[in-house]
Image (cartoon, grey):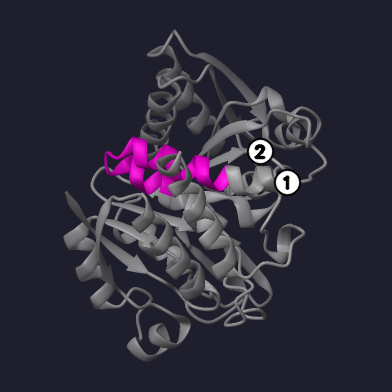
Amino acid sequence: MSYAVTLIPGDGIGPEVAQATVRAVAATGVGIDWQMAELSADIILRAGEVIPSHVVQSLSATKVALKGPVTTPVAGGFPSVNVALRKRFDLYANVRPVRAMPGVKTRYADVPIDMIIFRENTEDVYSGLEHEVVVDVVESLKIITRRASVRIARAAFRRALRGRRKVTAVHKANIMKLSDGLFLRCCREVAAEHPSIKYEELIVDNAAMQLVMRPETFDVLLLPNLYGDIVSDLAAGLVGGLGLAPGANLGDEFAVFEAVHGSAPDIAGRGLANPTALMLSAVLMLDHLGEPDAAMRLRNAIEAVYREGKPRTSDVGGSASTSEYTSAVIDSLAAPART
């Protein structure tokens, strides 16, 4: 069986990590009919729209995409591509597994870190409703709705029912009593529908401290958009950084799987990029497509390469090129067939 999937390589190191991931996915034996949809800062500027029509048409047809990083200007320029995609295709759940990688030296090398972050993906201050009230006074509106809060909570609890033990809702309802208060009430209502799953709540600043002090105590985290963005990057730092962090943007109809790191233009085209994050995102994609065996084999192959200690790219203490590392993952995938 072959699956049609939109491939958005992105820019910077995006095309390199995308090519490496396509090679690794092919080695699993799952047939993917990749539909190329080029998207970069230059293409966006020429098209005059954040999501050009060819990207919309491709994803509308395939309903699944694998996406590399796209450069987003800071404090000016066009809006975030990721935010635009989430709004256009109603990708309301940003899901980021955070799991320790064997053999990677971190401050938590001996701690069994294995959590999944569910971040609401469509509203909060990311709604982009801001304006300058008077000169040098800017107001941004934080939007929280029952509909968005309930559906992200249900997504988190559905995942928890698949072998997880606890959901932790993270909030700031002690200060933002209306907005975060509504989010929290919705989480409690959904928790009451799932009595078999332990439910707890943490104020976001306390949650950040507990993640640093006791990361092994977390399982499924449930957060509004802004807190989820910050906390998911913090959690990635516990296991080695964004280069090892996969991500999925899920809706009821569409799904976009992406590496959460940036486009790293300083090393683009030099064969130095680490494709692990996008490969792990492809693991999530394979599972989504109904290929859990292939997903597990790819995940195990990546972990085996790290466990053996080489080859590794420079960001994790090695000197291997993107291609050399990718070949090692592919060899690891093939290894069981040779024995």
Q: Quadrant of residue 45?
A: bottom left
Overall secondary structure of the magenta section: helix
Q: Position of residue 62 (x, y in %)?
A: 20, 59
Specify the amino acid type for callout 2: Ala
Q: Range of the magenta residues?
A: 283-303
**Does 286 appear in magenta?**
yes
Furthest residue in direction top, as rendered: 195
Compared across the picture, whether 280 is left or right of 209 comes to left
Residue at the spot of label 1: 104
For the point 30% across and 50% down, the residue is: 29
As rendered, which of 56 and 65 lies closer to the eye?
A: 65
Residue drawn at (54%, 78%) of the image: 12
- What SS does tag 2 mark? loop
Direction from residue 320 to residue 184 in the image, left or right = left
- Of circles 2 and 1, the one toward us is 1
Give the image location of residue 239, x and y in percent: 70, 43
> Residue at image x 44%, y 74%?
10
Q: Which mark is residue 247?
A: none
Crowdedness near tag 2: few (<14), some (14–19) or many (≥20) residues, C-alpha within 10 Å: many
For label 1, the crowd category at 10 Å Cα-Cα, with few meaning under 14, some 14 to 19 and many 20 or more, is: some
Residue type of the residue flagged with mark 1: Val
Residue 38 in view, yes or no:
yes
